[in-house]
Image (spheres, helix red, strand yellow):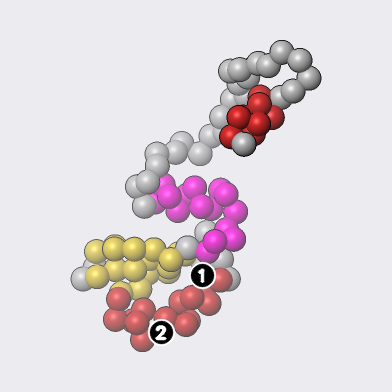
Amino acid sequence: MKQTTVNVRELKSRLSHYLRLAKAGESVEITMRGMPIGRIVPTSAPVQDRMEAMALSGLLLWNKRKLKPMAPVARVRGKQTVSGVLVDDRE
Protein backbone atom coordinates (compact mmCIF):
# COMPACT_ATOMS: atom_id res chain seq x y z
CA MET A 1 0.00 0.00 0.00
CA LYS A 2 1.38 3.39 -1.00
CA GLN A 3 1.82 5.91 1.82
CA THR A 4 2.04 9.70 1.73
CA THR A 5 3.29 11.81 4.63
CA VAL A 6 1.84 15.27 5.29
CA ASN A 7 2.12 17.80 8.11
CA VAL A 8 -0.96 19.20 9.85
CA ARG A 9 -0.78 22.62 8.16
CA GLU A 10 -0.68 21.08 4.67
CA LEU A 11 -3.45 18.63 5.58
CA LYS A 12 -5.71 21.45 6.76
CA SER A 13 -5.17 23.48 3.60
CA ARG A 14 -5.62 20.52 1.18
CA LEU A 15 -7.86 18.12 3.09
CA SER A 16 -9.98 17.24 0.05
CA HIS A 17 -6.88 16.20 -1.89
CA TYR A 18 -5.70 13.84 0.86
CA LEU A 19 -9.18 12.37 1.31
CA ARG A 20 -9.21 11.61 -2.43
CA LEU A 21 -5.87 9.82 -2.01
CA ALA A 22 -7.34 7.71 0.80
CA LYS A 23 -10.40 6.98 -1.31
CA ALA A 24 -8.07 5.80 -4.09
CA GLY A 25 -6.47 3.31 -1.68
CA GLU A 26 -3.50 5.30 -0.41
CA SER A 27 -2.57 5.69 3.25
CA VAL A 28 -1.84 9.25 4.49
CA GLU A 29 0.39 9.67 7.55
CA ILE A 30 -0.11 12.94 9.47
CA THR A 31 2.86 14.53 11.22
CA MET A 32 3.30 17.42 13.65
CA ARG A 33 6.79 18.88 13.92
CA GLY A 34 8.12 15.83 12.09
CA MET A 35 6.57 13.31 14.49
CA PRO A 36 3.76 10.99 13.27
CA ILE A 37 0.50 11.68 15.11
CA GLY A 38 -2.14 9.97 12.98
CA ARG A 39 -3.03 8.18 9.80
CA ILE A 40 -5.87 8.28 7.29
CA VAL A 41 -6.37 4.84 5.78
CA PRO A 42 -8.86 3.67 3.19
CA THR A 43 -11.72 1.63 4.60
CA SER A 44 -11.95 -0.55 1.53
CA ALA A 45 -8.32 -1.66 1.68
CA PRO A 46 -7.65 -5.39 1.49
CA VAL A 47 -7.11 -7.19 4.80
CA GLN A 48 -3.40 -7.65 4.03
CA ASP A 49 -2.93 -3.88 3.55
CA ARG A 50 -4.90 -3.06 6.71
CA MET A 51 -2.81 -5.48 8.74
CA GLU A 52 0.39 -3.94 7.36
CA ALA A 53 -0.92 -0.47 8.32
CA MET A 54 -1.68 -1.72 11.84
CA ALA A 55 1.82 -3.21 12.08
CA LEU A 56 3.33 0.10 10.92
CA SER A 57 1.40 1.98 13.59
CA GLY A 58 2.51 -0.47 16.29
CA LEU A 59 -0.95 -1.91 16.98
CA LEU A 60 0.20 -5.44 16.22
CA LEU A 61 3.29 -7.54 15.68
CA TRP A 62 3.04 -9.66 12.55
CA ASN A 63 5.59 -11.86 10.80
CA LYS A 64 3.44 -11.91 7.60
CA ARG A 65 2.99 -15.68 7.75
CA LYS A 66 -0.38 -17.35 7.55
CA LEU A 67 -1.59 -19.28 10.57
CA LYS A 68 -1.58 -23.06 10.44
CA PRO A 69 -5.02 -24.68 10.35
CA MET A 70 -6.16 -25.82 13.78
CA ALA A 71 -8.56 -28.51 14.87
CA PRO A 72 -11.86 -27.18 16.25
CA VAL A 73 -11.69 -26.39 19.97
CA ALA A 74 -15.35 -27.20 20.65
CA ARG A 75 -17.69 -29.81 19.25
CA VAL A 76 -21.46 -30.11 19.45
CA ARG A 77 -23.37 -33.36 19.52
CA GLY A 78 -26.13 -33.64 16.96
CA LYS A 79 -26.71 -31.73 13.74
CA GLN A 80 -26.30 -28.18 15.07
CA THR A 81 -23.03 -26.28 14.66
CA VAL A 82 -21.10 -24.45 17.39
CA SER A 83 -21.91 -21.12 15.73
CA GLY A 84 -25.61 -22.08 15.68
CA VAL A 85 -25.53 -22.82 19.40
CA LEU A 86 -23.89 -19.42 20.05
CA VAL A 87 -26.50 -17.59 17.99
CA ASP A 88 -29.33 -19.38 19.79
CA ASP A 89 -27.74 -18.59 23.16
CA ARG A 90 -27.52 -14.87 22.33
CA GLU A 91 -31.21 -14.62 21.45
Q: Which mark is residue 52?
A: none
Is 53 part of what is drawn in magenta?
yes
> Element under label 1?
helix
Please give left or right for residue 11 compared with residue 81 in the image: left
Q: Is residue 87 above or below residue 31?
A: above
Residue type marked 1? Ala
Q: Position of residue 33 (x, y in %)?
A: 21, 71
- Mark earlier in primary sequence (2, 1): 2
Residue farthest right in this picture: 79
Residue farthest front in this picture: 91
Q: Position of residue 60 (x, y in %)?
A: 40, 42
Q: In the image, which residues are magenta?
A: 42-56
Q: Residues within 10 Å of mark 2 (few under 14, many from 20)?
A: few
Please name the predominant secondary structure of the magenta segment in the image.
Answer: helix
Task: Name the residue beneath numbered marker 2.
Answer: 14
Task: Name the residue beneath numbered marker 1.
Answer: 22
- Identify the residue at horizontal 47%, vertical 49% (top origin): 52
Identify the image quadrant of residue 69. top right
Q: Position of residue 50 (x, y in %)?
A: 51, 52
Residue type marked 2? Arg
Q: Position of residue 73 (x, y in %)?
A: 58, 18
Q: Is residue 54 above or below residue 28?
A: above
Residue farthest left in this picture: 33
- Answer yes or no: is residue 61 visible: yes
Please tell me which residue lies in front, 27 or 89. Answer: 89
Please give left or right for residue 13 compared with residue 74 in the image: left
Quarter of the image that includes the C terminus = top right
Q: Is residue 60 above or below residue 68?
A: below
- Answer yes or no: is residue 83 visible: no
